[in-house]
Amino acid sequence: MSDARRALSEIDLAAGGVLLRDAGEGAPALIAVVQRSRHDDLTLPKGHPERDESLADAALREVREETGCDAEIVRMLEPCSYLSAGVPKLVVFFEMRLLAEGGALDPHEVEALHWLTPQQAVDALSYPTDRALLASVFGVRPAAD
């Protein structure tokens, strides 16, 4: 097996959502950010597709499980890639619009759900790839130290 073929076979593929909630006229939309106690982080909802599940369906399911919210996909965003435990990871994110909220959070995955403005989210997220994605989509930059 070639090195390129082996690298492709070892890619960890995931899907996630940038879930937006309308904050009222003139206010920026709020973004769902999940707090995970197991990883002690703040991140965007994401996870692995189940067998024969499309990336879009996986992203909607992960958002529902991790935020308790139902959503619809607005558009696909630019994928994020990084190394996770030495394995290349590719996360395909979708921008989503909130349809309904108030469902239960998966207690094994998520400690709390936070609704943040794009600037607050970029400043709070634990991972550079999450921050870069939101900075690109919303045109915000991390606050100066």
Image: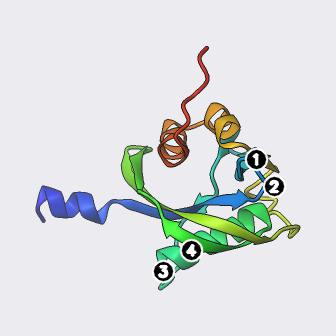
Looking at the rendered image, the disc whose residue lies closer to the viewer, 1 or 3, is 1
Could you tell me how far apart the alpha carbons at marks 4 and 3 are, in whole angstroms?
A: 6 Å
Instruction: Check disc 3 and give the amino acid type.
Output: Ser
Residue 54 — which label? Answer: 3
Callouts 4 and 1 close, C-beta under 8 Å: no
Query: Where does label 2 land, which residue?
Result: 24
Instruction: Check disc 4 and give the amino acid type.
Output: Ala
How many other residues sit within 10 Å of disc 1, few (<14), some (14-19) or many (≥20)? few
Could you tell me how far apart the alpha carbons at marks 3 and 2 are, in whole angstroms?
A: 33 Å
Looking at the rendered image, the disc whose residue lies closer to the viewer, 4 or 2, is 2
Indicate the position of residue 42 as horizontal and vertical percent values. 68, 42
Could you tell me how far apart the alpha carbons at marks 2 and 1 are, in whole angstroms?
A: 6 Å
Q: Residue at x 48, y 74 (%)?
A: 55
Looking at this view, is 62 or 4 the one in front?
Answer: 62
Q: Locate the C terminus by quadrant.
A: top right
Q: Is residue 135 above or below residue 5?
A: above
Relative placement, left or right, of 50 versus 104 is left
Could you tell which of marks 4 and 2 lies nearer the N-terminus? 2
Relative placement, left or right, of 12 versus 40 is left
Relative placement, left or right, of 76 versus 95 is left
Q: Locate the N terminus by quadrant.
A: bottom left
Q: Residue at x 55, y 45 (%)?
A: 138
Callouts 2 and 1 close, C-beta under 8 Å: yes
Instruction: Check disc 1 and give the amino acid type.
Output: Ala
Query: Where does label 4 land, which residue?
Result: 58
Looking at the rendered image, the disc whose residue lies closer to the viewer, 3 or 2, is 2
Could you tell me how far apart the alpha carbons at marks 4 and 1 are, in whole angstroms?
A: 30 Å
Q: Residue furthest bottom?
A: 52
